[in-house]
Image (cartoon, rainbow, N blue to C red):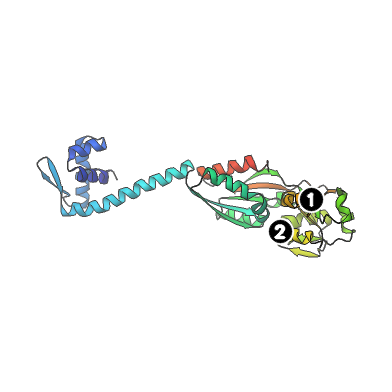
Amino acid sequence: MHQLEAFAAVARERSFTRASHFLHLTQPAVTRAVAALESELKTRLFDRLGRTVQLTPSGETLLRYAERVLQLTREAKAAVTDIETGSAGRLAVGASSTLATYLLPPLLAQFRQAHPAVEIGIHTGISAHIRTRVRSGAADVGLVTTGPHDEATVGDGAMTMVPLAGLDTCVVMPPSHPMAASGCVSAATLLSGGLPLLLMETGTNLREYAEAVFGSAVVPAMELDNVEAIKRMIAAGLGFSLLPELAVRTEVIAGTLATLKLSGVSHTSGRRIELVYRRDKYLTAALRRFIALLQAEVPKL
């Protein structure tokens, strides 16, 4: 690269002396660089005409490539610098469907405002699948929820797991139901109250949590694959469920859903929001800043 820089400078300046001044090198250093390049290519690149130099046909051909190579080199250095300073790059983020819907949007907007040139790709799914994507390298970082059995089953020396906040889970039911005004209700009362139970599909943390509360033998009246669908069913008076408090805030304020605390259950506050990434993952500046944003802002939300 130094030889090409010297060659291009001499070609542009038509003088070894002026090229050395431009490059802040001694003239012998520039002469040696060009001579080494000529030796490697086994051809003369310049005709020396007194105090000026002129490109040979080989030199003219090389100059076209040298200018492209040097421009790409400058662009490559700038791109790497941008990534290392956090002003550019790409993040592959995995998030559980619930967190991607109800937690992540304002955080992504905040990050995008501070780092508009950083590309962000989002993949959603159940938390177990997000952990798998992070473990395989398909995602740089994952935002997941924990279930009752996660601490015993997902421990992995290759993964860094950072608890961000507790995930409050509440009973959600139609506001018109007689129990809706009680403020607190037991699992036994819920199951005997005649209101159908609606649950997430098997394999999700919400389903595991519900089975820990009601018993694994519980049979839901409906099994759905997303929180938004369950909310719509509840609002239509078709049943009740256990859902994250953050997922129903808007509806509770609007009066279309009601929430109750669950009494006599030790698992109520056991769920968490966690950040996961590979322990050996190289953290670019953009990724470090995204992680810092999540650690600072998720507890507030």
Is residue 268 or residue 276 the one in the foreground?
268
Residue 203 seen in the current view: no
Distance from the alpha carbon under mark 2 to that under mark 1: 15 Å
What amino acid is found at the position of numbered circle 2 in the picture?
Answer: Glu
Occupied quadrant, residue 291: top right
Quarter occupied by the N terminus = top left
Mark 1 secondary-structure assignment: strand
Q: Residue furthest front?
A: 254
What amino acid is found at the position of numbered circle 1 in the picture?
Answer: Cys
Tell me residue 216's x, y (percent). 81, 59
Occupied quadrant, residue 173: bottom right
Residue 82 seen in the current view: yes
User: Which residue does the image show at 56% across and 45% down from the upper left?
Assistant: 111
Give the labeled residue for mark 2: 228
Give the labeled residue for mark 1: 170
Residue 1 falls left or right of residue 301 = left
Tell me residue 238's x, y (percent). 81, 63
Around disc 2, counting alpha carbons within 10 Å, would you say few (fewer than 14), some (14 to 19), or many (20 or more)? some
Quarter occupied by the C terminus = top right
Tell me residue 80's x, y (percent). 43, 45
Of tags 2 and 1, the one toward the viewer is: 2
Is residue 63 or residue 282 the one in the foreground?
63
Mark 2 secondary-structure assignment: helix
User: Which residue does the image show at 27% across and 53% down from the upper left?
Assistant: 65
User: Which residue does the image show at 21% across and 45% down from the upper left?
Assistant: 12
Tell me residue 236's x, y (percent). 79, 62
Mark sitting earlier along the chain (2/1): 1
